[in-house]
Amino acid sequence: MAKLDWDDVRYALAIGSAGSLAGAARTLGVNHTTVLRRLDALESGLGARLFDRKRSGYHPTEAGFALLEQARHM
């Protein structure tokens, strides 16, 4: 497994909880573009897409569910 940056994982957790970039940004106190940039970096580092982007929001993929579950135990 690739070396993970906890801050990037924290952003993924916020997206998973909020279901959107805007909601995650509010939770983290940052701009939504920062959330997207951190998610892109995490997905690139892992070589896997963590969320499906839909009109209804961000929904975890199988890899996303696995990462979020592991992160919640940290």
Image (cartoon, rainbow, N blue to C red):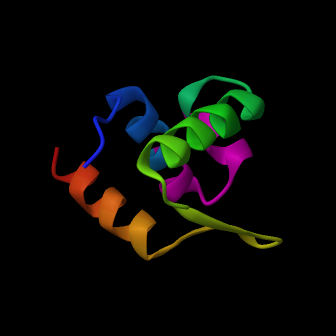
Question: For residue 25: magenta?
Answer: yes
Dividing the picture into quadrants, the one containing residue 41 is top right
Q: How many marks?
A: 0
Could you say where residue 28 lies in the image, as x and y percent from the top left? 55, 29
Q: For this view, does 16 lie left or right of residue 40? A: left
Question: Vertically, is 55 above or below 29?
Answer: below
Question: For residue 38: magenta?
Answer: no
- Please report the residue visible at 51 percent of the width from the left and 73 percent of the height from the top: 61
User: Relative to the observer, which residue lies in front, 1 or 67?
Assistant: 1
Residue placed furthest toward the top: 30
Give the main secondary structure, helix, strand or loop, of the magenta stretch: helix
Could you say where residue 12 lies in the image, as x and y percent from the top left? 48, 47
Could you say where residue 9 lies in the image, as x and y percent from the top left? 39, 40
Quarter occupied by the C terminus: top left
- Please report the residue visible at 73 percent of the width from the left and 43 percent of the height from the top: 22
Q: For this view, does 52 lie left or right of residue 62? A: right
- Please report the residue visible at 40 percent of the width from the left and 27 percent of the height from the top: 7
Question: Vertically, is 68 above or below 35?
Answer: below
User: Relative to the observer, which residue lies in front, 28 or 65?
Assistant: 65
Residue placed furthest toward the right: 55
Could you say where residue 20 lies in the image, as x and y percent from the top left? 68, 54
Q: Which residues are magenta?
A: 14-27
